[in-house]
Image (cartoon, coloured by chain):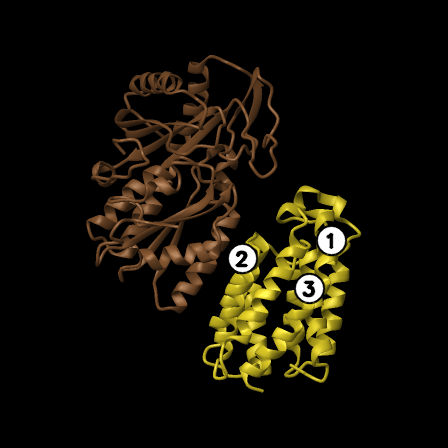
Chain colours: A yellow, B brown
């Protein structure tokens, strides 16, 4: 599948992210300032428009760079800049790949994860988006081709694990143990995106 | 976004800065000859967008690369890092250096976590001069890092800022209290206590700053006495007087004293004291011409 076709699939999944807005707002309000729903919804809407505009001959890097810039632009916040920066770093890691093949996906997830960890000054276990991204990267590294359903299950387990973690980063750290019992909003956003990918093209494997 | 009239002269490194609004003359005021080439700002106390950051980087790039010089705040940094990535994908060369001069915001062993406050003004002056004399990007970066490493600041707050977005004070403080070590957005400092005479406060701030710089007899420094927004020049000069006397007693040479509003916090009452430990090169760079309509003369 050409990168432009994958971009159309990504755009379709982003269209569905508006459905997650209220849930993410609620999760974030429990621990932070409650702007995550707006950030993800506005960012996803921006990504959908941006990746639909990349042109039929776009390479993977072109799609990811457009997506990263658009996500950061949607509702400027630390989460938006972190994820946007992760996507732009992912673009660099894909070189001149023209398709989202398994090796390219593995490379882009690894690059996005390490950039978000470095810039956010965070590590797995601190109740962040990394608690989903790191298990996803491990799953992708463990097998040459992973069905999307398995990635969704991995992400779901990662989200569940955040309910027992005490926040250490960002505004959520200010509430400390009060965040216990509630899943992390950023991690949940990644799960919802993977589920949206699944529901828009369930036969895909990556 | 604001760009220096005429842009960065060809062949010179572009200097970009930015951050939240609410600190004038920081950041918009530090654009001009011998200072920054372009600046991107966000809303009051909110980071500039990555779009504005990228636009400023593009506007400042005359082909010799761009130094982004910002305060050490997460949102400012993340958006500039993203913008730098996008600029590099366009073939530009961008380096980011963060000012972290506020000694009260983290202990010395976590100096990299400290916030950037008024001391960044010294860095603007030195990197602007280094760029103007034609230094290559890596050399301008080195000047920025060296200036920041030699700069320390500590502030005191006497009243809070009311945020326009909420209409509420950013923190609570009694009319007879002050906060030693306050941040430029009202972040808590080291000690909350009753008001004390200006000389005592100046001693507290200067002692913390001077101890870390290791000032000894014969050291040469530049001093910045900065008003946070609602403190009169008369009061700032009282602090300047005390700092001058203290440094003279230590036999430290004060090469330059700047007194005025250089980095404010809306209408917060209070002040900060910054000291830059000078060597010969930094002295020459600090003395080089710099000009902006928003900054007090003599920068």
Residue A177 location, quadrant: top right
Query: Which label lies toward us, 3 or 2?
Result: 3
Residue A121 visible here: no
Q: Residue furthest right?
A: A181
- For the point 58% across and 39% down, the residue is B165
* Residue B212 in the image, given as x and y percentages of width and height: 41, 32
| Chain of the residue that carries numbered disc 1 in the rendered image | A
Q: Which residue is mark 1?
A: A27
Q: Residue furthest top?
A: B197
Q: Which residue is mark 2?
A: A81
Residue B172 location, quadrant: top right
Q: Which residue is mark 3?
A: A18
In terms of depth relative to the viewer, which is nearer, A193 or A142?
A193
Q: Are marks 1 and 3 in contact (CB under 8 Å)?
A: no
Q: Quadrant of the C terminus of chain B?
A: top left
In terms of depth relative to the viewer, which is nearer, B226 or B194?
B226
Q: Are marks 1 and 3 on the same chain?
A: yes
């Amino acid at each position: 599948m050409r990168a432009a076709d994958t971009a159309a699939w990504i755009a379709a999944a982003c269209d569905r992210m508006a459905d997650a807005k209220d849930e993410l707002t609620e999760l974030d309000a429990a621990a932070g300032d409650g702007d995550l729903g707006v950030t993800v919804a506005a960012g996803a809407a921006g990504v959908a428009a941006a990746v639909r505009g990349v042109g039929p001959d776009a390479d993977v890097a072109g799609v990811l760079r457009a997506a990263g810039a658009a996500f950061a632009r949607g509702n400027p916040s630390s989460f938006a800049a972190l994820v946007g920066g992760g996507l732009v770093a992912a673009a660099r890691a894909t070189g001149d790949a023209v398709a989202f093949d398994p090796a390219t996906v593995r490379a882009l997830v690894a690059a996005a994860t390490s950039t978000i960890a470095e810039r956010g000054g965070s590590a797995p276990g601190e109740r962040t988006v990394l608690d989903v991204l790191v298990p996803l990267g491990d799953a992708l590294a463990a097998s040459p081709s992973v069905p999307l359903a398995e990635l969704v299950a991995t992400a779901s387990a990662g989200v569940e694990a955040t309910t027992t973690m005490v926040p250490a980063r960002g505004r959520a750290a200010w509430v400390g143990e009060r965040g216990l019992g509630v899943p992390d909003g950023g991690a949940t956003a990644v799960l919802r995106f993977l589920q949206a990918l699944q529901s828009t093209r369930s036969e895909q494997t990556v | 976004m604001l760009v220096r009239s005429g842009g960065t002269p060809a062949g010179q490194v572009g200097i970009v800065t930015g951050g939240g609004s609410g600190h004038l003359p920081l950041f918009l005021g530090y654009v001009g000859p011998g200072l920054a080439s372009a600046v991107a700002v966000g809303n009051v106390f909110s980071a500039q967008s990555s779009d504005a950051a990228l636009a400023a980087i593009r506007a400042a790039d005359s082909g010799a690369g761009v130094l982004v010089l910002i305060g050490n705040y997460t949102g400012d940094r993340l958006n500039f890092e993203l913008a730098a990535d996008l600029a590099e994908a366009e073939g530009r060369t961008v380096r980011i250096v963060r000012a972290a001069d506020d000694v009260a915001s983290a202990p010395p062993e976590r100096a990299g976590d400290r916030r950037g406050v008024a001391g960044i003004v010294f860095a603007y002056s030195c990197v602007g001069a280094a760029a103007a004399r034609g230094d290559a990007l890596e050399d301008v970066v080195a000047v920025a890092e060296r200036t920041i490493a030699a700069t320390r600041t500590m502030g005191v707050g006497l009243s809070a800022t009311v945020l326009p977005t909420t209409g509420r004070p950013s923190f609570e403080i009694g009319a007879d209290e002050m906060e030693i070590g306050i941040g430029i957005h009202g972040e808590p400092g080291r000690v909350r206590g009753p008001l004390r005479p200006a000389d005592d406060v100046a001693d507290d701030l200067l002692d913390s700053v001077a101890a870390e710089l290791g000032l000894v007899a014969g050291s040469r420094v530049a001093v910045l006495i900065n008003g946070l927004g609602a403190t009169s020049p008369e009061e700032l000069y009282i602090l300047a007087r005390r700092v001058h006397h203290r440094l003279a007693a230590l036999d430290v040479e004060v090469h330059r004293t700047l007194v005025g509003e250089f980095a404010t916090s809306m209408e917060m009452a209070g002040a900060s004291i910054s000291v830059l430990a000078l060597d010969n090169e930094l002295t020459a760079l600090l003395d080089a011409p710099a000009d902006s309509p928003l900054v007090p003369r003599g920068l």
